[in-house]
Image (spheres, helix red, strand yellow):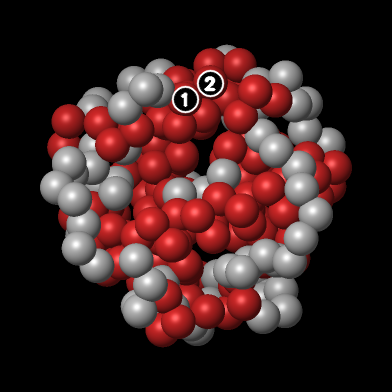
Amino acid sequence: MASLAMHLAIAEEYMKRNAVQDRNLFLDGSLAPDLGSDQIASHFGSYEKPKTIIEFLKTRMNLAKYLEEVQISNDFDSGYFLHMIADDLFYQYLYTEEVESKTPEQIRKEVYSDYDFVTQHILSFYKIETDRIKKWSNNKKGKPVYFTPQGCDAFIAAVSKVDLQKAEREIRADLSSFRENFFKSNKIKTRRQIFHSSRPKISS
């Protein structure tokens, strides 16, 4: 999943482009799935223990199931929905050839270390108030395994431009098509491109 700092940055950037009636409610929703005691339930995922990284990426959260069970009716729900979209696309980006041989435990450990390495960049670059996430955020120095600060910026920019109403219609119709349309509209040709190389050009 994307980190709390990424989710907060995505929500803040989204609100710069879209009218949100209750900003605090939207921000609360954008963080809520990661703050509960049962994050599998809060991400509508499966409790079956994954045997491979592919199963881990497919079952940790379920965006389609979320829309099957939730009627988006207020700003909290919209923030929650944006969080779910970000996590789904994050897993699509993260999946590259090099992770296939690793266990879910290895991926989880390395990804969470990467969060710590890029947190300060995100908080500083997007001028984010840390009170909402201070308890869960760490700032460490080191070399990320999977993504760079520039890659995080590209991810945040792309996801924050999602039209939530249009996304809801597309995901309800066909989640795979939504993902492919997202990649194409942001000129992302490969999943490796956004995290593992220089910042891709994100269409305005």
Q: Looking at the figure, which quarter contains the C terminus?
A: bottom right
**Along the viewing direction, whichever of 132 and 165 lies nearer the viewer:** 132
Residue tagged 2: 28
Which disc is residue 108 wearing?
none
Residue tagged 1: 35
Instruction: Inspect the image, locate mark 2, and give the three-letter code of the amino acid beneath it.
Output: Asp
- Counting from the top left corner in percent of width and height, residue 169 is at 28, 48
Whole-number angstrom distance, CA of label 2 to CA of label 1:
10 Å
Q: Earlier in the sequence, mark 2 or mark 1?
A: 2
Q: Is residue 179 visible?
A: no
Label 2 element class: helix
Instruction: Inspect the image, locate mark 1, and give the three-letter code of the amino acid beneath it.
Output: Leu
- Counting from the top left corner in percent of width and height, residue 107 is at 44, 62
Residue positioned 34% across, 66% down in the render = 103
Residue positioned 42% across, 75% down in the render = 99
| 100 lies left or right of 199 | left
**Along the viewing direction, whichever of 191 and 37 lies nearer the viewer:** 37
The image shows residue 74, relative to residue 126, as above or below, that is above
The image shows residue 125, relative to residue 188, as above or below, that is above
The image shows residue 133, relative to residue 45, as above or below, that is above
- Counting from the top left corner in percent of width and height, residue 42 is at 31, 30
Q: Is residue 62 visible?
A: yes
Mark toward the viewer: 2 or 1: 1
The mark tally for this picture is 2
Residue positioned 67% across, 65% down in the render = 144
Label 1 element class: helix
Residue positioned 40% across, 66% down in the render = 92
- Counting from the top left corner in percent of width and height, residue 26 is at 53, 23
The image shows residue 136, relative to residue 28, as above or below, that is below
